[in-house]
Image (cartoon, grey):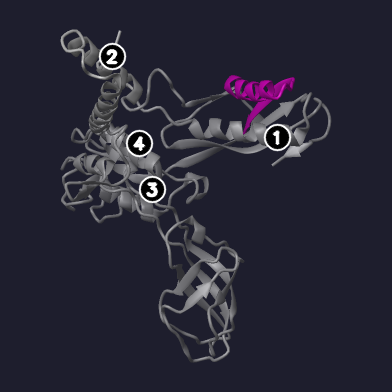
Amino acid sequence: MAQPYDNKSIEEVRTLIISGLQREFNNKLRILPKSFVAILAKILAGIFIILYKQIGWLFLQLFPSYAYWGEVNVLGIKIRPLLEWGNLMGVGYPHNGTQWEGLIEVQVTQIGQFLDSGTQLKSPLNNQIYLVKETTLLTDETGIIQIICASNGTAGNLDIGDPIQFLGSLSMVRKNAVVSDVKKVAKDDEIESEYRQRVSQRFRTPPMGGALSDYRQWANEVSGVWNSYPQKDINTPAGVLIWVAGVPEQYKNRIPDKELLIKVGDSCTYDPITQKATRKPVAAIIDPKYDGTYNNIMPIGVVFFSVNIYGLKGIEVDDFFDLCKAALNDYFLSREPYIRGLSDDNNKTNIISKNSISSVVYQAAVAVKAEFDRVELLYSGEEILNYNLIVGQLAEMETLQIFEELDIDLLGEE
């Protein structure tokens, strides 16, 4: 049985046209040569397929999950369908990447001179261009200069101790310098899958005037937010508490800084496009001091666990360590506190259990035909069977240890 919209090839359409023409004409007028019918059918099939595919493409644009990410030109107007959906739903445009910023230590050759803003440097590690951010007076033999990467993206990230060089010859400083501090880690432009997920989520759960899902939606719009966990403040009639987790690539252990928390507060209060306070209800309190500090928006806390695996057989410890570490990290990162009305009641992820850890290790062992005797889950140095994450807590694996036997020295450790 044909579907309402069934994919067909040019050959299938051509065959249908030939059959129709032969049935209608050959019984009445038998002068049409077969070659003419074949050519005409092929031309008509091409026309029909073009229209067919255009209609199919337009049909997909009705749904954010399938809307086209790229740019198309329609009657002289350039649009990007998925971005148009994002704007209509209030998500806005994709997040732009950010620039790396940091401090470098330079050796001064002429004290009392100025190092102009915009002076260029280049890193031999990534070949990226960096600029002196502000004109600086050199007052000592060693100067600390603030620089910024000239382009967005993680390609410009540097670590403390990395070398960097001035372009050209400067009389007041030596050519070679070194990174002494990192002020801001860069991030890449938001990719298609991340933006599409945000648009689809807004489409499924549009703002309803202050529900828990609204606060999560508003908070997660902020660039750098990995997830958020809002809950009513039981000590204040109109209070709302929001715990924020930062993206792991930017924030160690997903613990954000105060700057990101303030951005989340602004996003929960003001529309990012109009800058009008059209989001949280007027009576809802996320800034109890009313000074823009948003003390009710807090960084997430992280609970660390250790995993020991005993009696490994059938594989080298180092090989199984790498495989098991990745699987266990994914497990711990997927755990989050349960929030009634926001979490999935059919798939609660707030409990960290020894049985679940054993299951993860077992699946990794089966994949490489290995065996182990038992798994140990530790918290604060003591073995536990279960741990229940409360609101404001996330989990991470601190150490993984693997023993080939139950009573020998440690063989794999991080």
Foreground disc of the pair 4, 1: 4
The answer to whether residue 233 is visible is no
How many residues crowd mark 2 within 10 Å: few (<14), some (14–19), many (20+)? few
Residue ID at (30%, 54%): 293
Element type at mark 4: helix
Distance from the alpha carbon under mark 4 to that under mark 1: 33 Å
Check disc 4 and report the residue beneath it.
Answer: 197
Asked whether the residues under the numbered discs 2 and 1 touch, taking CB atoms below 8 Å apart as contact, a structural biologist would say no
For marks 2 and 3, the one nearer the N-term is: 2
For marks 2 and 4, the one nearer the N-term is: 2
Foreground disc of the pair 2, 4: 2
User: Residue type at mark 3?
Assistant: Glu
Q: Nearer the viewer, residue 250 or 34?
A: 34
Q: Is residue 367 magenta?
A: yes
Element type at mark 1: helix
For marks 2 and 1, the one nearer the N-term is: 2
User: Residue type at mark 2?
Assistant: Gln
Check disc 3 and report the residue beneath it.
Answer: 190
Write the start and end of the magenta stretch as one range: 355-379
Asked whether the residues under the numbered discs 3 and 4 touch, taking CB atoms below 8 Å apart as contact, a structural biologist would say no
Q: Which quarter of the figure has residue 225? A: top left
Q: Position of residue 296 (x, y in %)?
A: 32, 45
How many residues crowd mark 4 within 10 Å: few (<14), some (14–19), many (20+)? few
Check disc 2 and report the residue beneath it.
Answer: 3
Q: Position of residue 128 (x, y in %)?
A: 51, 66
User: Residue type at mark 1?
Assistant: Phe
Element type at mark 2: loop
Check disc 1 and report the residue beneath it.
Answer: 321
Q: Which quarter of the figure has residue 33? A: top left
Q: Is residue 331 magenta?
A: no
